[in-house]
Image (tube, rainbow, N blue to C red):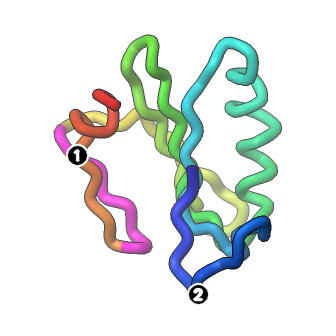
Amino acid sequence: MLVYCGEKVPRNRRFPNPLIVVEVLSPSTGSMDLGVKLQGYFGLPSVHHYLVIDPDRPLLIHHKRGTGDAIETRIAGGSSLRLDPPGLDLELAEVLAS
């Protein structure tokens, strides 16, 4: 899943400039989601947040674009998570219950 803030994109087209990318870990792709995909997503200048959800725990890992080439990573805790940009507040209980 991704969050894109822009013009409507025609079907069968890639979304240009995604802002937030969300992955749900699965046994078959988990290592790729935490490695190759992490590097690839942050290779796109538009990506500011990469959220990885582990449904087995439940756990949300938040990767955020930092200064320069830095990627800040934290395990989300508390009741909500602020994603800025775009100025979105996620209720963690709702996200992890899905």
Q: Secondary structure at mark 2?
A: loop
Question: Residue 3 versus residue 85: which sits nearer the camera?
Answer: 3
- Find residue 91 and name its label: 1
- Amino acid of disc 2: Glu
Measuring from the top left, give residue 53's x and y in whole percent: 48, 31
- Dot 1: few (<14), some (14–19), or many (≥20) neighbours within 10 Å? few
Measuring from the top left, give residue 21's x and y in whole percent: 58, 53
Left/right of residue 55 with respect to residue 37 in the rendered view? left
Number of numbered discs overlaid on the protein picture: 2
Pointer 2 or 1: first along the chain? 2
Q: In the rendered image, which quarter is residue 6 located in?
A: bottom right
Q: Which residues are magenta?
A: 79-86
- Find residue 7 and name its label: 2
Q: Relative to 43, say whether 85 is above or below.
A: below
Which is more foreground, mark 2 or mark 1?
2
Asked whether residue 65 is in view, the answer is yes
Q: Secondary structure at mark 1?
A: strand
Measuring from the top left, give residue 72's x and y in whole percent: 54, 49
Q: In the rendered image, which quarter is residue 23 located in?
A: top right
- Dot 2: few (<14), some (14–19), or many (≥20) neighbours within 10 Å? few
* Residue under the point 68% across and 31% down: 34
Question: Residue 78 versus residue 37: which sits nearer the camera?
Answer: 37
- Amino acid of disc 1: Glu
Q: Relative to 68, say whether 40 is above or below.
A: above
